[in-house]
Amino acid sequence: MIDLRTLETFWVVAQTGGFHRAAEKLHTTQPAVSARIAQLELELKVRLFERDKRGSRLTVKGREILKYAERMLALRTEMVLSVAGANALEGTVQLGVSDTIVHTWLPELLKRLNHEYPAITLEINVDGSTGLAAALLENSIDVAFLLGPVISGSVANLPLCEYPLSWVVREEFPLGPEAVTLKELAAFPIITFARQTQPYRELTELFNKAHQQRVRLFANSSLSSIVRMTLDGIGVAAIPVEVVSDHLATGKLRVLTTIDQTMPTMVFTASFIKGPDTHLNGVVAALAQKVAGEYALFSDRPSHQDQTISAD
């Protein structure tokens, strides 16, 4: 008899494209996955996957069976939610998180998840948005909070938050308090996100348009390291004020006002894999959207306009 666990294994192999990846996703062994697929093929009397060095691909019959498997798994989730409610949800979600989110509202999300869905377990991976998007498309993570959206038919995207970059310096830094120009900023190291990120590319373009090609951009993949370098007075940080709100409140850091500059804005999404048995992904993404909205509502960030002064 075909059971739901076997169908779930079949669906995960189809999504991940390999028995080894499916085993990691299901927290089991590759021989166990192979045995379930072999039993399913035996019962259905068809070959479900073509296997080679590049992975496993569905056969024509496999694609046909996949439609039925998705419907049955979706029906199981619908039954559980209808009878037992959301509190019955349990399982593990592989969550990928951008460093910026770690430094803002992620702790509050973890508290809320633990309170509202105590049977959901999170395994968290902190990485840059490029790496998180690749991991999501490879099915090695289920949900990602990243600079999005991720464009794929298998991925859903919920808007999370928008954080404009600001120029942040140590209190004693030799700039300000009057408004500064890009030329004045370019005399100092600019400390910001890693080279392959959207903020780095947009800052490069910003200085190029101002004919400041000799600017020194110190790329850094660690937000904690960026903040530490800024506190040490090494240069001017181009980061969201949300990640250094405590240091701004104590006066260790301050925000520079600028003349006629529109700073890049970091736009984050909760991107997650869609599927018949992936309701947990949507639950985590939806709660993250709610927490991010509440964080923005109660944030005392000065408006972006307050940090820019016109030259007129």
Image (spheres, grey):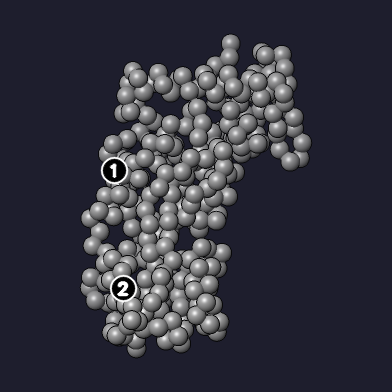
Look at label 2 and name its amino acid. Gln
Residue appearing at x 56%, y 38% in the figure: 153
Q: In this view, does 214 lie above or below 53?
A: below
Residue assigned mark 2: 307
Secondary structure category for the residue under label 1 = helix
Residue 38 picture location, percent across and down: 68, 22
Q: Residue at x 65, y 36 (%)?
A: 17
> Considering the image in quadrants, where does the C terminus appear?
bottom left
Left/right placement of residue 197 relative to residue 262 reads right
Measure the alpha-carbon separation of dots 2 and 1. 33 Å
**Total numbered circles:** 2
Tag shown at residue 255: none
Position above or below: 292 against 6: below
- Residue 112 is marked as 1
Q: Earlier in the sequence, mark 2 or mark 1?
A: 1
- In percent of width and height, residue 253 lies at 30, 76
